[in-house]
């Protein structure tokens, strides 16, 4: 399984305008040019699925389908062991192939809701979702590569487990409140990166690509 991360980050590593707030409220007020969104969508189309954490689903209510094209049917995934995503959220609307990591304690009523909507439940633990098992479950279902778009908590867990191959960072021309969500939330060991490439995707906007060194 190839797993890369894509994030839009301020130059001080912040990925949301405030805790519990949508990253759309970070990007839209900057007047971000269309070429930045186009670069993001082109990147998404290179992967078998896009993955986000449940915190991001709750904060952003995203569709994760804006990269849909005649040649590319989007596939989206998240982990929701505690069934916190409300039924009315767009992630559960059945408009694209959707896979959700669940555990043995996930409520039966939620599993029934997923089944009714054609959403694939991916068993990946007893009480806590095991990321390795979840990714293996995606692979068993035909998904060979994943682009994880955060948020910070999921990114940190993936980093700690040594599951990240590459990091794509859209560097936003802004400094934000350091008390907000960090690209890698919380404490942890230093991670070493190697810059593979960079490109200017709009005036003031860079797309940086790093390889994550393991061990
Ligand atoms: N700028 C950007 O590119 C960008 C991209 C994405 C998100 N964001 C922002 O990031 C913020 C959300 O980030 P976040 O850190 O609060 O949440 P998150 O990383 O999106 O989701 C974290 C949640 O996922 C669930 N989870 C289940 N299994 C997990 C596991 N093994 N490891 C880690 N998490 C697991 C946990 O919820 P349970 O304990 O309930 O299961 C956990 O609280 C939002 O403000 C969003 O707008 C920004």
Image (cartoon, helix red, strand yellow):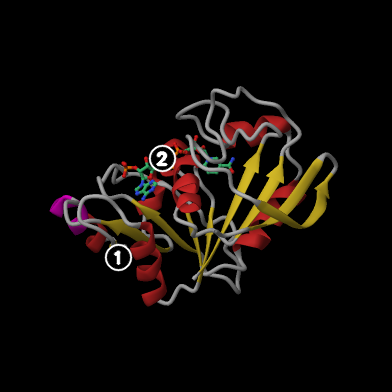
Q: Which residue is found at the position 35% from the left and 69% from the top?
A: 137
**Residue 110 inside the magenta-drawn segment:** yes
Closer-to-camera residue (140/125): 125
Residue 79 seen in the figure? yes
Read off the magenta span: 107-112
Q: Which residue is mark 1?
A: 118
Label 2 residue near ligand 1, CB within 8 Å: yes
Identify the disc placed on residue 16: none
Q: Which residue is found at the position 74% from the left and 51% from the top?
A: 208
Closer-to-camera residue (179/35): 179
Q: Position of residue 117 (x, y in %)?
A: 28, 61
Q: Which residue is mark 2?
A: 55
Q: Position of residue 72 (x, y in %)?
A: 57, 71
Q: Is residue 187 left or right of residue 205?
A: left
**Residue 21 inside the magenta-drawn segment:** no
Q: Earlier in the sequence, mark 2 or mark 1?
A: 2
| Residue that protrudes farthest toward the right in the picture | 203
* The image quarter in which residue 116 lies: bottom left
């Amino acid at each position: 399984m190839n797993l890369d991360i894509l994030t839009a980050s301020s130059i001080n590593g912040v990925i949301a305008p405030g805790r519990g707030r949508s990253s759309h409220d970070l990007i839209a007020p900057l007047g971000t040019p269309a070429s930045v969104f186009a670069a993001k969508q082109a990147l998404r189309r290179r992967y078998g699925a896009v993955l986000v954490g449940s915190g991001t689903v709750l904060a952003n209510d995203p569709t994760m389908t804006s990269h849909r094209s005649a040649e590319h049917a989007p596939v989206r995934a998240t982990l929701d062991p505690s069934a916190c995503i409300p039924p009315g959220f767009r992630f559960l609307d059945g408009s694209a192939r959707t896979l959700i990591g669940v555990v043995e304690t996930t409520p039966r009523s939620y599993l029934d809701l997923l089944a009714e909507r054609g959403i694939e439940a991916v068993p990946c633990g007893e009480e806590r979702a095991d990321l390795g098992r979840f990714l293996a479950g995606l692979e068993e279902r035909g998904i060979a590569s994943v682009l994880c778009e955060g948020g910070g908590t999921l990114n940190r867990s993936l980093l700690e487990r040594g599951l990240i191959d590459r990091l794509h960072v859209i560097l936003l021309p802004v400094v934000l409140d350091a008390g907000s969500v960090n690209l890698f939330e919380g404490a942890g060991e230093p991670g070493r990166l190697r810059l593979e490439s960079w490109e200017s995707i709009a005036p003031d906007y860079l797309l940086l690509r790093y390889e994550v060194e393991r061990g």
